[in-house]
Amino acid sequence: MLSCIDLSVKVGKKQVLDSVNADFKRGQVTYILGPNGAGKSALIHTIMGSLIFKVSSGKIVVENRDITQLKPYERSRLGIFASWQEPVAIPGLKTFDFLYHSYKSTHKELSKQEFREKVLNPLVKRLKIKHALLDRDLYVGFSGGEKKRVEVLSMLLLKPKYIFLDELDSGLDVDAEKELFTQIYSYAKKNSAALVVVSHTFRVHNYIPADRVYVLKHGQLAASGGKELVERVEKQGFGGV
């Protein structure tokens, strides 16, 4: 389990999270809901170890280990993965090289040819990614859908235990949304991964049903509950929570 315990976070002098307590259990789907600026993305950035988000009090614990001071790559090696609403383009870094070295960081070493043929190509086919995309600079000039498919490809390569999706549905059409979320949910169920979803699109719940729901407002935990909380927010808005 990954837990945030009395977690308070600042960006500069601004408080963005205030004494948040949340548990993300393996084998469970958790939704984080809230209006714009509620602290949803701030929570995920903090869990991943972003240097911009400073923990002022509290801690983050994974399987009884305090990871509050660990670097992002150390958290990744513990099986924590995040997909961002707008992945950063990196000119000069080929997509294939990024994927290959990411894979090598947590798996046995393969030659580039072995990696491409045995590991990458089957996933590329499954996710309907054009092979030409792999030879382009990472996310440079990619469409929204292409970015999100590569994000999911990264997830499947790394095989994480804890998956955080920050508005992955942003930029996807309905068909692509269904395909990708079905793939993610299938992976999470098969591998008993904790799957955490941030989304403003309630139709995502059709593909990934919630077990647990947290609602954030103004950086604080305003409510928690089961899937019925998703339905209440959809009908009544956040004012009804």
Image (cartoon, grey):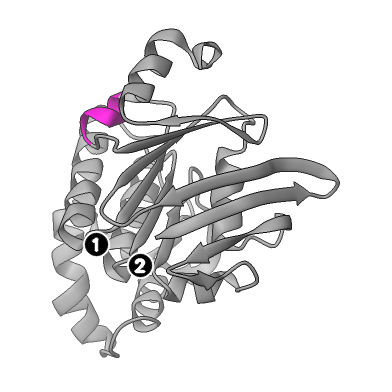
Q: Which residues are magenta?
A: 203-207
| Dot 2: element | helix
- Quadrant location of residue 17? top right
The residue closer to the viewer here, 129 or 169, is 169
Q: Are marks 2 and 1 in contact (CB under 8 Å)?
A: yes
C-alpha separation, residue under disc 2 versus residue under disc 1: 8 Å
- Quadrant location of residue 117? bottom left
Disc 2 residue type?
Asp
Mark 2 neighbour density, 10 Å: few (under 14) some (14–19) many (20 or more):
few
Q: Residue at the location (44% across, 9% down)?
A: 236
Residue at the limit of the structure toward the right, as seen here = 13
Residue 135 coordinates in the image, percent (x, y) = 35, 67
Count the labels in the image.
Answer: 2
Q: Residue at the location (33% across, 54% down)?
A: 194
Q: Which residue is mark 2?
A: 135
Q: Which residue is mark 1?
A: 131
Q: Is residue 169 visible?
A: yes
Q: Is residue 227 magenta?
A: no
Q: Is residue 204 magenta?
A: yes
Q: Is residue 88 visible?
A: no
Q: Main secondary structure of the magenta part?
A: helix
Residue 229 coordinates in the image, percent (x, y) = 38, 23
The residue closer to the viewer here, 166 or 22, is 22
> In the shown orientation, is residue 2 left or right of residue 125?
right
Residue 83 coordinates in the image, percent (x, y) = 43, 52
Quarter the N terminus occupies:
bottom left
Residue 241 coordinates in the image, percent (x, y) = 51, 17
The residue closer to the viewer here, 12 or 109, is 12
Q: Residue at the location (37% across, 59% down)?
A: 162
